[in-house]
Image (cartoon, rainbow, N blue to C red):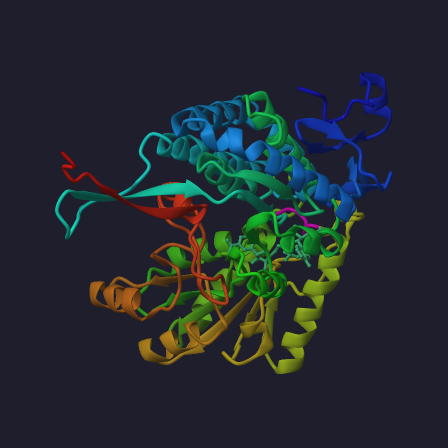
Amino acid sequence: MTSAHPASTETQEQAQPRAYLNFIGGEWRPSVSGQTFDDTNPARRDEVIARFQKSTPADVDAAISAAQAAFPAWRAMPAPQRGAIILRAALLLEARQAELARDMTREMGKPLRETMGDIQTAIDFGKFVAGEGSRPEGDTVPSAIPDKMCMTIRQPLGVVGVITPWNFPMAIPAWKTFPALLAGNTVVLKPASDTPLSSAHLTEILDEAGLPKGALNFVTGSGGVLGDALVTDPRVAMISLTGSTEVGRRVAELCGRDLRRVSLELGGKNAVIVMDDANLDEAVKAVSWAGFGTTGQRCTATSRVIVHEKVADAFGRKLAEAAERLRVGDGLDTATEMGPLVNQGRVAAVHEYTEIGLGEGASLLTGGRALTEGELAGGAYYAPTVFTNVKPAMRIAQEEIFGPVVSIIPVASYEEAIQAANSTIYGLSCAIFTEDARTVFRAMRDINAGLIYVNAGTTGAEPHLPFGGVKQSGNGHRELGHKAVEEFSEIKTVFVSYPDVK
Ligand code: NAP
């Protein structure tokens, strides 16, 4: 095991941030560019957490070569042994959870209880998927021909390119890397440039858990610069990307040219429907958490609340009060309920949507401005924002804002609510609050989304259940659950003939 940051001594670490290297073929190496970029704290824009390699396509090429070289031995290792390495990694994550959560809060901004939760989902899924190494699924099927037996077995694909976003810096890299490795693939991981530190920690931990050299390779740098080199290399059998629909579309187009397998988990414009018989306080609490948790930067964040007109005013008043009560601040402070946005650029992007909403005629109930007073000066803070009198076709009701902005859309009936809920290009997550069992079952049928929540907000995943969206929220794959390994493997059908040749 080589060190991810060999240049640092303890004294230097106090004076300057650590410089992390790429991990290629089991060695931590600098990029051929000789350049680095800064990983900064969105709560204090001048604080550099760590430095990372500004890699080039040549570094990606070296990582793919290392992954390709490691593939034959890794796929030959019995799957239960591969699972044992993943289990060790999950236990190491568990042992270091608090320290890893602090680093994640510093690089990404969300409060400690959320970064602890992010790592917890990586731990839980690691433990779950490790066991899948001992129970790979296959069919044993009778043949139509005498003296013949048929079966299906799963085989790995080869080198998998994993590209991840910044909003779940440990969970999403783990959700992809663990099942890809378990299935016998080798991996090149390219994390988001806003949050490479958590992926560096995951890489170190998998190395420490006993992963052979080259099975996992880690390359940092701009997706715009490195993306094509990874996505179009003929040695890469599959790309697994979580990110924006815009980037997903480009990656899918490039993969489509070579018919490369591509798994996409993309954007959302998730709605909560609140019927007139709903428990309003329960709905407000859920929307406040699902809309403003992670500062509205979850793919499953609630950004629309479709409310029956009989209760829309009361709901809006209560939600605005809840938004104003939220304690906004540095996520390292345990009293903080909502942290900063991931970077300063996102403050301007979110504020642009406030202006778009006002221009479209929506009514601003609260928020709608950057927060720069007192301790918030120097951080990427934006006030929890609530619009009402929003129409389903408005841009603030159609486009993913990815910030703490919730739009209330009043409707007159269940039918109108479903029509509004299904009216965007996205279909990731949707929720309904009602006390009527018939309405619950109708909504389960009528809402076109990959995830449905009843009397709960639009967020939350469990490791043993599939996770993903329909329409332009993805391309039909699902993460998590026991089917996660299928995504990273291929079916092989085997026909065995055993006629008596005496
Ligand atoms: P993003 O800008 O699309 O970036 C995602 C990843 O793609 C990053 O690693 C990025 O690298 C890389 N990338 C950028 N341009 C690329 C290119 N041309 N080719 C290949 N890779 C490229 O998304 P984000 O801002 O990190 O994350 C937010 C988005 O992710 C939201 O839309 C959210 O809804 C979605 N998301 C979806 C799910 C889900 O499960 N459906 C979960 C979480 C997030 P750089 O960082 O270096 O640019």
Name above or below for residue 478 compared with residue 63: below
Q: Position of residue 83 (x, y in %)?
A: 43, 28
Q: Quadrant of residue 13?
A: top right
Residue plotted at (87% across, 25% down): 15
Residues in magenta?
A: 337-342
Which quarter of the image is occupied by the C terminus? top left
Q: How many marks?
A: 0
Would you say residue 383 sits in the magenta stretch? no
Q: Foreground: 392 or 314?
A: 392
Please name the predominant secondary structure of the magenta segment in the image. loop
Residue plotted at (17% across, 49% down): 143
Q: Position of residue 98 (x, y in %)?
A: 58, 27
Q: Position of residue 185 (x, y in %)?
A: 51, 39
Q: On the picture, is 334 further left or further right than 448? A: right
Residue 332 in view in this figure: no
Q: Foreground: 191 or 329?
A: 191
Q: Foreground: 148 or 43?
A: 148
Q: Position of residue 262 (x, y in %)?
A: 52, 56
Residue plotted at (43% across, 49% down): 487
Q: Quadrant of residue 37?
A: top right
Q: On the picture, is 15 further left or further right than 91? A: right
If the picture is divided into quarters, which one holds ligand 1? bottom right
Q: On the picture, is 459 further left or further right than 249? A: left
Residue 416 in view in this figure: yes
Which quarter of the image is occupied by the N terminus? top right
- Furthest toward the top, the residue is 10
Name above or below for residue 416 compared with residue 462: below
Q: On the picture, is 41 further left or further right than 165? A: right
